[in-house]
């Protein structure tokens, strides 16, 4: 192995954190659409349930955030559970607001900069029973909830994600049927996406009215779609359709008020200029082929190429170049960029060290070109309930024994701590944690 020394550093004040979401870590959530979904047969792998999750609602957030601080992190992204704040349409729970205020105060005391997500996949049951985000009133319901939360928490937070991955919420729940309500209807998905854009826009304006100094944005799951055969116009068209529908439609609407997909074009004038930053969640890249044998997926076939560096269940292919692509895409919004999620499921912690170093290197490449990337939040701090995949996928830097609630320190804790403390990457840390990618990251 070549013996040389080099380093890549990030700007002073760069945010290094991890991300979590309420239903995935809190436990004992019984009043949202996912608590109902989990008890229906064949909705979650092996019938698994969130249960206690990481037991944050009982107070274990304290020890986990202590671990974050002790290992060099300076920020954390978490979400608020709407169904706890508003358990019924005509009732608010002040104790739940106090609970979240205590968590944010705890973050402040620990020196962790908070980023708060107001909606992360879960809806209150009362809302679900009235059609959820299919209902034309849903944006106003969301705005009302936001107007309750912001005054209670603004003392400790100025950075807000209105809605996490509205593209995934709509596609998973209304195209593929993997999320509640389990529908498979592109027209319904489009209506939900439009209502999510409207809800975001109302929330954006409400937050700025209540907290003028706030920074507000989406967190969009950016999926890299590349034509399987670059020479094929059909493959290029299929990849372009998916890119426009999945990646572009929602954040572009929040930029210029035009919701444009291959299936629907509509003006949303109230959404113009309703982002102060663009949150990018990036995990992997798909190859896309036009395939006449797949009418159930609109003749589009997504796959990973043979020989991909795959996660244990094959859910994620390690494609670091897609991170650079995602950040380059985000440049068009002419806003500060925050990597709001990035990570890989890997219980054995064999892939994660190189995945982490390779992806942070791609973020550095963007920063080195003076692109306005302000922070990186790794998914996730500790293993948590991964939606329809239950507990079969482990994304945590820290492992979790769901029977005992014991946390298990993985090597990746040390990898990320080294990055956070260095505010960068060095040849020494790559040699120590992932020597197989040293020449790739520090190419001569």
Image (cartoon, rainbow, N blue to C red):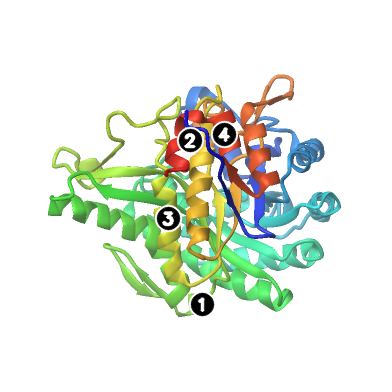
Foreground label between 4 and 3: 3
Q: Earlier in the sequence, mark 4 or mark 2?
A: 4
Residue 395 locus on image (x, y percent): 57, 34
User: Which residue is the site of mark 1?
Assistant: 273
Frontmost residue, 166 versus 96: 166
Residue at 68% over, 39% down: 417
Q: Secondary structure at mark 3?
A: helix
Q: Quadrant of residue 63?
A: top right
User: Which residue is the site of mark 3?
Assistant: 326
Q: Earlier in the sequence, mark 4 or mark 1?
A: 1
* Left-right relation of 222 to 426: left
Q: CA distance from mark 4 to mark 3?
A: 21 Å
Residue neighbourhood size for the residue with mark 1, other residues' Cα within 10 Å, grouped as few (<14), some (14–19), many (≥20): some
* Left-right relation of 432 to 158: left
Q: CA distance from mark 2 to mark 1?
A: 42 Å
Q: Earlier in the sequence, mark 2 or mark 1?
A: 1
Foreground label between 2 and 1: 2
User: Which residue is the site of mark 4?
Assistant: 395
Q: Secondary structure at mark 1?
A: loop
Q: Earlier in the sequence, mark 4 or mark 3?
A: 3
Q: CA distance from mark 1 to mark 3?
A: 21 Å
Residue 265 locus on image (x, y percent): 31, 71
* Left-right relation of 123 to 45: right
């Amino acid at each position: 192995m070549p013996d040389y020394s080099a380093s890549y550093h990030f700007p002073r004040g760069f945010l290094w954190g991890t991300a979590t979401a309420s239903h995935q870590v809190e436990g004992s959530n019984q009043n949202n659409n996912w608590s109902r979904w989990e008890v229906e047969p064949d909705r979650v792998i092996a019938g698994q349930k969130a249960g206690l999750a990481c037991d944050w609602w009982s107070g274990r957030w304290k020890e986990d955030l202590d671990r974050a601080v002790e290992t060099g992190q300076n920020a954390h992204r978490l979400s608020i559970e709407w169904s706890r704040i508003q358990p019924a349409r005509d009732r608010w729970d002040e104790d739940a607001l106090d609970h979240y205020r205590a968590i944010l105060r705890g973050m402040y005391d620990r020196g962790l900069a908070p980023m708060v997500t107001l909606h992360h996949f879960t809806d209150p049951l009362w809302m679900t029973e009235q059609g959820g985000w299919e209902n034309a009133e849903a944006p106003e319901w969301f705005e009302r909830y936001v107007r309750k939360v912001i005054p209670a928490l603004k003392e400790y937070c100025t950075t807000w994600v209105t809605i996490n991955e509205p593209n995934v919420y709509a596609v998973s729940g209304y195209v593929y049927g993997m999320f509640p309500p389990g529908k498979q209807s592109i027209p319904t998905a489009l209506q939900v996406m439009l209502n999510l854009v409207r809800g975001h826009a109302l929330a954006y304006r409400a937050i700025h009215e209540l907290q003028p100094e706030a920074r507000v944005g989406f967190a969009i799951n950016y999926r890299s779609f590349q034509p399987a055969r670059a020479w094929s116009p059909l493959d290029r068209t299929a990849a372009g359709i998916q890119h426009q529908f999945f990646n572009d439609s929602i954040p572009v609407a929040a930029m210029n008020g035009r919701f444009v997909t291959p299936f629907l074009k509509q003006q949303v004038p109230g959404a113009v200029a309703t982002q102060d930053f663009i949150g990018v969640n990036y995990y992997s890249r798909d190859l896309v082929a036009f395939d006449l044998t797949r009418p159930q997926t609109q003749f589009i076939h997504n796959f990973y190429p043979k020989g991909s560096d795959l996660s244990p269940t094959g859910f994620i292919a390690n494609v670091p170049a897609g991170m650079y692509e995602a950040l380059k895409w985000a440049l068009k919004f002419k806003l500060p960029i925050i990597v709001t999620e990035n990570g890989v499921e890997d219980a054995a912690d064999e892939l994660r060290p190189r995945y982490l170093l390779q992806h942070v290197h791609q973020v550095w490449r963007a920063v080195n070109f003076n692109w306005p990337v302000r922070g990186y939040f790794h998914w996730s701090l500790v293993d948590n309930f991964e939606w329809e995949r239950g507990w079969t996928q482990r994304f945590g830097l820290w492992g979790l024994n769901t029977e005992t609630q014991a946390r298990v320190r993985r090597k990746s804790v040390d990898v990320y701590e080294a990055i956070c403390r260095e505010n960068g990457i060095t040849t020494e840390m790559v040699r120590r944690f992932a020597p197989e990618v040293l020449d790739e990251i520090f190419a001569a």
